[in-house]
Image (cartoon, grey):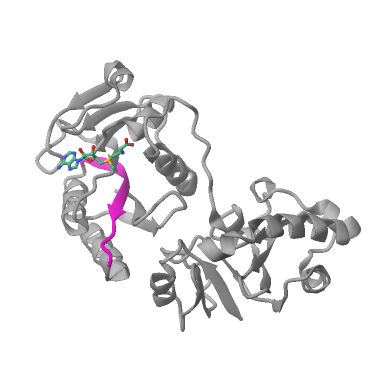
Amino acid sequence: MQWLWTSRDDFERDLADELPRGRVLAPALAIGDAPASGAEPPVFARQGFPIAAEVAANLEALVAAIRPLVPPAPVAYALHVWVPDSDAANRLSSQATEFAEAVTNALGPDGARIVRAHELYDPDAPIIQVCLTESGRAYVGAAALSRTASTWPGGRARMKIPSGAPSRATSKLAEAIAWIGYGPESGDVCVDLGAAPGGWTWLLLRRKARIIAVDRANLQPDIARDRKVLHLRDNAFTYRPAEAVDWLFCDMVWKPGEVAKLLALWGQKHWARYLVSNIKLPMKRRLDTVNDVKRVLIAGGWRELRARQLYHDRDEITLHARR
Ligand SMILES: C[S@@+](CC[C@H](N)C(=O)[O-])C[C@H]1O[C@@H](n2cnc3c(N)ncnc32)[C@H](O)[C@@H]1O
């Protein structure tokens, strides 16, 4: 069975290149053979599912395609109707919302078991998905919770950041921690390389961590004043920690190869137990760049390395690893 995947707009070629027998279907959409069981979702995938049916995007056809995917009672399931994140397809988002409501009503008592995907706890519980395309067709399928790339419709993990956060970068780290499934805890020591104006440090403070913020630029004044923050106006490439820390965070707009070498050094020296880093991607050879960075980090001793272009990532990806 083939799988449909969605990416950030303009990353569908990179996504297709990651898939077995992958090809681009439309902006932000790619299709390929089923991934190996237990495989991590592709780096450039926001969401994906096995295609059970391709139908005309009308209520009758959608309900007929969805009904066989509904699990037997009393198992709860989720229903996501989404559009790829391209300019043309985003115009259909209100239609997606209307279809979700109409399908739920049309399913009758079966629809009563639809819950939010975040509320599913059974790893086998299905997330039934409908992807509406610009061409008036819809792809329908279902993947078990344990095999879906995201619990957000179309993988659009919109993080609501409270006012007071100094930069949009806060959303990137909030999403990264949700994706990883754990994060710094009270009293953990974090190094934040490229910390200014302080969006990541701000979030780490909310988690009651202590932060060494390394950046020549200014932090937002209230963050710089916090007694749990030590602001060092150093160059991240020459800064060395006085002792090992719990977490290394890195969010510098710099050449991926050089950032990867720096992170690998931290791995070799055991300077941190956990790594979260954003890597900016070039315009070309993006998948090759990701693979090169991964190789350098693994050579540096980082384990359980995961990489993903998260919803709040632009021309960049997020990495996580442990030492
Ligand atoms: C995208 S911003 C970081 C945003 C930050 N994570 C936040 O949440 O507010 C990149 C930062 O990296 C810093 N930077 C770039 N090169 C650096 C270097 N060699 N050493 C330290 N900081 C650097 C820049 O000064 C800039 O403040």
Left or right of 62 in this view: 295: left
Q: Residue at x 79, y 54 (%)?
A: 101
Question: What residue lies at 26% left-to-right and 66% top-to-bottom?
Answer: 289
- Identify the main secondary structure in magenta: strand
Residue 277 belongs to the span the image colors magenta: yes
As drawn, 138 above or below 322: below
Q: Can residue 86 be seen in the rendering of this structure?
A: no
Q: Quadrant of residue 153?
A: bottom right
Quarter assignment of residue 75 = bottom right
Instruction: Determine which quarter of the picture holds residue 202.
Output: top left
* Residue at 21% from the left image edge and 61% from the top image edge: 296
Give the total of numbered labels.
Answer: 0
Name above or below for residue 303 compared with residue 163. below
Q: Quadrant of the N terminus?
A: bottom right
Q: Is residue 101 magenta-colored? A: no
In the rendered structure, the answer to whether residue 124 lies left or right of residue 58 reads left
In terms of depth relative to the viewer, which is nearer, 131 or 302? 131
Which is more toward the observer, 202 or 25?
A: 25
Q: What range is drawn magenta here?
A: 271-283
- Looking at the picture, how far across and down is residue 316, in whole percent? 33, 55
Q: Quadrant of ligand 1?
A: top left
**Taking 227 as reference, is 141 left or right?**
right
| Residue lying farthest to the bottom in this orientation | 21
List x then y, in percent, for residue 163. 47, 26
Q: Residue furthest left?
A: 238
Residue 108 visible in the current orientation: yes
Taking the view exactly as shown, the residue that stands out farthest to the right is 109
Q: Could you tell me residue 195's position as x and y percent?
A: 26, 35
Percent position (x, y) of residue 180? 45, 47
